[in-house]
Amino acid sequence: MPGHEAWLRGPIGSVPVEVMHVAHALTQCAEDIDRALAGFDPSWLWTQPAGAASVGFHLTHLTGATDRLFSYADGRSLSPEQRAALEIERAGGDEAQDVASLTRELRSTIAHSIKRLESLDPASLDDARALGAAELPTSVRGLLTHAAEHAARHAGQIVTTAKILEGTAQDRC
């Protein structure tokens, strides 16, 4: 249906056209995840079907990685809070978190990321940046593009894992 997907709806706020694809991808991810988790049984959040990563892990990682990638794009090092969040991700997530809090954090991170895009100077897109502790060489453009494709990959995993869990539960009935 025309207009259904974010990229078909036109510009988002005052995001520069050079990075509109990033805003569209992040918006689409949030919407796909919201649809996939509507009616999602909260008891499945940390379930790992066939050893695959849980929906809870993907939500946690998607939120944290997006925030980190935008920090690197801004030319900043990780804050102590970001480092602590990364350790929680590495441990598989915080099982005390629930679907509502994780999706709320994700939507907040995406909204904040889009605000950051709105203030981006397109002339900075090819500015050199360093990624992670290894300080891998990249650029603002590279980091933002990776944030978009990384988000899409994990949103797809959330959608797929939620469907698998739902199908598995229906098979048991």
Image (cartoon, grey):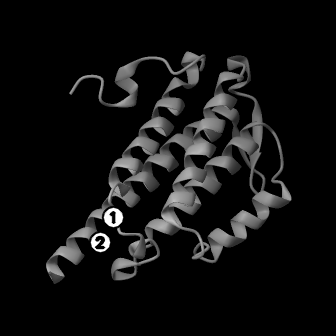
What label does residue 57 carry, if any?
none
Residue at 57% x, 59% y: name it.
101
Residue at 42% x, 17% y: name it.
10
Picture coordinates of residue 159, whole percent (x, y): 34, 57
**Could you tell me which secondary element the residue under label 1 belongs to?**
helix
Picture coordinates of residue 28, whole percent (x, y): 42, 38
Direction from residue 37 to residue 11 in the image, left or right: right
Q: Is residue 172 visible?
A: yes
> CB under 8 Å between callouts 2 and 1?
yes
Amino acid marked by disc 1 = Ala
Q: Is residue 133 visible?
A: no
Quadrant housing residue 121: top right
Label 2 to label 1: alpha-carbon separation: 5 Å
Count neighbours of disc 1 (C-alpha within 10 A) and say few if under 14, some if 14 to 19, many if 20 or more: many
Picture coordinates of residue 157, whole percent (x, y): 39, 60
Quadrant housing residue 4: top left
Which residue is disc 2 drawn over? 165
Which residue is disc 1 drawn over? 162
Pick whichever, 76 or 13, lies toward us: 13
Picture coordinates of residue 7, whole percent (x, y): 39, 26
